[in-house]
Structures are given as C-alpha cells and as structure tokens.
C-alpha cells in the first residue's frame, strides 16, 4: 500500500486562515530553543550542510530561519500600509521562529513597535537588549506589572479594574504606565463591551489625571478579516469608529493616542482598517493570512529539516509503524526521519503529509510516532544522514507550511508554532 509521489509543482487548494493578534493558549505553546550567539543569530559554524548543535550535541533536525525574509516581509507590509506604523507581533516565540532574532530583524525591516501576548515575552525582549516600544495584551492576575511598567512595556486594559491594577503598579514603579484601551468591537474576546466603554474611559481619564497612566492607544481586533467582504468586518469598523468618537469627546484623543485594529489580513487587503498602526503577525514570517488570494509577495522564513537516521530494505507486505496503517506492496527502502509529535509533527500527518527526500516528494508512510516517522522511497537511493525537508518556501519543490496545513485541516500558524524545543532554530 505504498503511496505515489506528488509532482513537485503540485499544490493543494489553499483555504483562508486567520491572523490572531490576541491570546495564544499557554498549553498550546512550547518553550522554543534556538541555536544562536549572544546577538540572537546563528553561530558561524551552523551551516545548511552541517548538523545543528544544541549545547554541543549534534541534533537530528533543525528549523532554519531566514532573517532576510523577515526583514523583507516587514518592509513589504509597511509599503502596503503607507502612513501607518507597523507593530510586528512576535508572540509565541516569534510564531515558533525564535522571538529575539525575529524581533531584531523586524525592526531592521522597518517595524516601529513590537507586540507580545504576555508580559514575560516582553521582558525577555528587554533582557535581550531590545529597547523598541513593545506592547503586551493578555494580563491575568499575578503578572509582574511593576516590572513591566518599570521597563517601559506598554500594556492593554479592557476593564476598569485592570486600569486600577496597572495604575497601582505605576505608583510602585515610580513612573507613568503607558496604556492601550481595548474595545470589543465584535470578536467577543478581550476588551470592553461597547456598553462598558464609557466606564473604562472614565476610569482611564481619572487615573491619567493623577499621573499614574497615560492613554497611549485605543485598539481592537477583527474576527473575520481573512474573509474579505465578510459583513462582520464593516460592522466591527463601525463600532470601532463609534468608540473612537466617544473617546475623543471624553478627552482621550490626540496624535499620541495610536488607533489600531488591523491584523495581517487587514493590513494586506483592507486600507480602511489601517488607521495609525497595523499589527501583522503571521505575515511577518512570510505565511499568507488569506491563502485563497495568494502569497502577496511574502517569503516564508522557516525551513524545517531532518536527517535520515536509518535506511533499510524491507520485503513486500511489511507493516510500517504503529497499527500497520501502511503496508508495503513491494520490496522497498524505508527511511526513518527523527522527528515526531513531541517535536510538533502532528500525529494526524500519518499517511497524509509530504516531505522532500532525494529530490522528490514522499508521503509519510504509517503512523507518526512521538520521536520519528517513516518514508517509503521505493528503489531510490537513500542513506543515513541524507537531508529531508518537511517544509520550506517551496522554491525547490518542497512542501510549504501552508500545504501541510491544508493536508491536515488546520492553519499554517499551528504548523510553525508547534515546532518543539528539541528542534534548534538556526538563524541566518
């Protein structure tokens, strides 16, 4: 039951995905490692033709991240939003690409600000010496607000009680907190409901008058920007405009108050939503927020590779991997790829996803295991140490992260952010 290879040029139909500049559930995030020097870049010895090392140990796989692609993508996004600043969203370890190195590359590409989901991510940027403005927007109880304010991390608030907590932290830190007020315009997630917006404005103005906070922005997030023409988009923008008008009437206005609602999809397709700043996330890393409309000229930054750990001949009728969901129909060569679901290769990729090996695409043969999966290369040559490309930018015929997402019924965001800590990020 071997599977035929897919021609290198074949591409699956692409489905729309969403750019989410909001929460990343903690349980869905891996603490991701990188092979880098103190500047956050790859050591000189980490080359494509040499296995990566992690703490001096040779590793069987690596995620190569092209920082020039990050820079170019940010420059492209800035060009699509003339007159608006770019906040590059680097949460979830830079969508799995390595936060610090990607943040630096984004700034070099023209980003004016950085965005993170959690305060601890922003503090990691500060620890690495990144001094650019950075904003964090998910603030559950117990977060280090004093340190955040003291280290110039801008914060979001969608409730009067959180405004008070941040103001109290500002008193302890001995400096004014910069605050972005969030209005829920229809996503029904974070932010103040429209009926609660006046109370949030009143509390922020009261705290601003005492000098503990400064309202630095007003923001929201779109639910369906990846579906151009969806009626919710126009509805949310109308609510956002009403909230801005209410804020201006209350005295929260001026050029220092940055208005922002556009994610990657809106940045690329919806000029009306760009206001003073755009917040691209997935597009920074070269993955399309609206695959049905193409790649917008973006370049995928990550290439995930591994090296064959074992190649062997097996007879016809050999069951492969757990459950024998794949059975060879002839004598053939199998290759063991040392990556599994512990590394972010979804178990659902069993008999579905393709990789590039020996210059051809090969479908995963049998069950994806915790640390490994198999490929069937027929009579083609294959040896231990040969490189396998799981996904990349597609320029050499290899699958892309979007193709993996399409074959697994998910989105490209999940493909890249799932890559685990055993896989070093090698920045070039």
Image: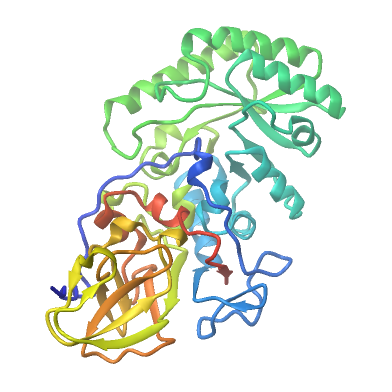
Q: Nearer the viewer, residue 109 or 131?
A: 131
Task: Give x and y (percent) for residue 315.
Answer: 18, 86
Q: Residue at x 51, y 71 (%)?
A: 62
Q: Is residue 109 above or below residue 193?
A: below
Q: Residue at x 43, y 67 (%)?
A: 371
Q: Please identify the quarter of the rendering in which residue 276 is found.
A: top right
Left or right side of 110 for 22: left
Near-viewer residue (396 or 267): 396
Across and down, in percent, residue 114 comes to 62, 45
| Residue at the outermost right position | 174
Q: Quadrant of residue 1?
A: bottom left
* Residue 137: % across, % down: 59, 32
Name the residue: 34% across, 49% down: 411
Would residue 223 be found to the left or right of residue 196 on screen?
left
Answer whether residue 280 is visible to the viewer in this image: no
Q: Quadrant of residue 400?
A: bottom left
* Residue 260 percent across, percent down from the top left: 53, 31
Left or right of 340, for residue 231: left
- Of residue 290 and residue 128, the one placed in the foreground of this image is 128
Q: Quadrant of the C terminus?
A: bottom right
């Amino acid at each position: 039951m071997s599977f035929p290879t897919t021609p290198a040029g074949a591409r699956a139909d692409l489905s729309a995905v969403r750019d989410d500049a909001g929460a990343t559930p903690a349980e869905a995030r891996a603490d991701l490692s990188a092979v880098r020097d103190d500047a956050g870049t790859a050591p000189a010895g980490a080359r494509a033709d040499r296995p990566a090392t992690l703490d001096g140990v040779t590793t069987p796989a690596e995620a190569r991240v092209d920082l020039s692609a990050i820079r170019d993508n940010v420059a492209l996004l800035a060009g699509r939003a003339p007159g608006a600043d770019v906040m590059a969203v680097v949460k979830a370890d830079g969508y799995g690409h390595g936060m610090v190195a990607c943040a630096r590359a984004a700034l070099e590409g023209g980003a004016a600000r950085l965005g993170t989901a959690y305060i601890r991510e922003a503090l990691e940027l500060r620890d690495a010496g990144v001094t650019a403005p950075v904003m964090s927007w998910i603030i559950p109880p117990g977060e280090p607000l004093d340190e955040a304010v003291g280290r110039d991390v801008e914060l979001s608030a969608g409730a009067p009680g959180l405004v008070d907590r941040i103001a109290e932290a500002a008193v302890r830190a001995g400096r004014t907190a910069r605050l972005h007020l969030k209005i829920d315009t229809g996503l029904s997630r974070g932010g103040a409901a429209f009926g609660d917006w006046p109370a949030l404005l009143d509390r922020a103005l009261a705290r601003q008058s005492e000098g503990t906070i400064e309202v630095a922005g007003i923001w929201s997030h779109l639910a369906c920007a990846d579906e151009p023409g969806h009626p919710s988009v126009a509805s949310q923008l109308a609510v956002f405009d009403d909230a801005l008008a209410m804020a201006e009437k209350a005295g929260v206005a001026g050029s220092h108050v940055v208005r922002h609602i556009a994610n990657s999809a809106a940045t690329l397709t919806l000029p009306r939503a760009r206001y003073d700043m755009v917040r691209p996330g997935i597009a920074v890393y070269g993955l399309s927020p609206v695959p049905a409309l193409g790649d917008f000229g973006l370049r995928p930054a990550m290439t995930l590779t591994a090296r064959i750990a074992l190649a062997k001949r097996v007879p016809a009728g050999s069951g492969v991997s757990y459950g024998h969901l794949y059975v060879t129909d002839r004598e053939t060569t199998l290759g063991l790829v040392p990556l599994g679901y512990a590394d972010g290769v979804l178990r659902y990729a069993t008999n579905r996803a393709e990789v590039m090996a020996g210059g051809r695409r090969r479908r995963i043969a049998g069950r994806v295991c915790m640390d490994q999966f198999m490929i069937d290369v027929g009579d083609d040559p294959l040896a231990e140490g040969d490189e396998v490309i799981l996904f990349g930018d597609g320029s050499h015929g290899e699958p892309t992260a979007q193709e993996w997402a399409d074959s697994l019924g998910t989105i490209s965001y999940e493909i890249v952010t799932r890559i685990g800590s055993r896989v070093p990020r090698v920045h070039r």
